[in-house]
Image (spheres, rainbow, N blue to C red):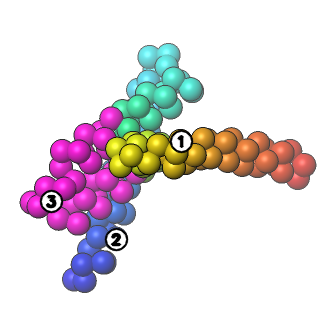
Amino acid sequence: MDDRFRIAVAVGLGGAVGTTTRAVIASLLSRWGAAGLWGVLFVNIVGALALGWYAARVRHTPRWSATVAGFVAVGLLGSFTTFSAFSLEVVDLFADGSWLSGTAYAMGSVGAGLTAALVGRSMAARS
């Protein structure tokens, strides 16, 4: 099997596990009265924590193949919450000393994301 195909399959399988895990956690949190924003906040923080740990501790270890990295980082944690990937990108920019780029990326991402959500809601309300 071609390495690129193997990695793509691993990402897809990780994505299935990540999205399912997110749905199960959201369901459990809603039973405990933490639905909506609190559930999303919890999942985003846990995802960012897990991806930060993975990136610092495991990702650069030779024993972990690109297939495993694709499954865990892109598939599992990326689908669990895209906020984790965004958070790691900002932290990596800061760690590289790119404070201006990191700040601009963070502010631009949040600002553009909020703007896009508002425009999308506006478009939906008009249709």
Mark 3: amino acid: Trp
* Residue 13 colored in magenta in the image: no
Mark 1: amino acid: Thr
Find numbered disc 3 in the image and state the secondary structure of the residue it sits on. loop
Q: 10 or 62, which is in the foreground?
A: 62
Q: Which mark is residue 8?
A: 2
Residue 3 at what x, y percent from top left?
24, 78
Residue 22 visible from this viewpoint:
yes
Read off the residue under disc 1.
103
The mark that comes first in sequence, 2 or 3, is: 2
- Magenta span dominant secondary structure: helix
Residue 74 at what x, y percent from top left?
36, 57
In whole angstroms, how far apart are the C-alphas of marks 1 and 3?
31 Å
- The 10 Å Cα crowd at callout 3, few under 14, some 14 to 19, many 20 or more, is few
Residue 80 visible from this viewpoint:
no
- The 10 Å Cα crowd at callout 2, few under 14, some 14 to 19, many 20 or more, is some
Mark 2 vs mark 3, foreground winner is 3
Residue range corresponding to the magenta coloring: 49-78
Mark 1 vs mark 2, foreground winner is 1
The mark that comes first in sequence, 1 or 2, is: 2
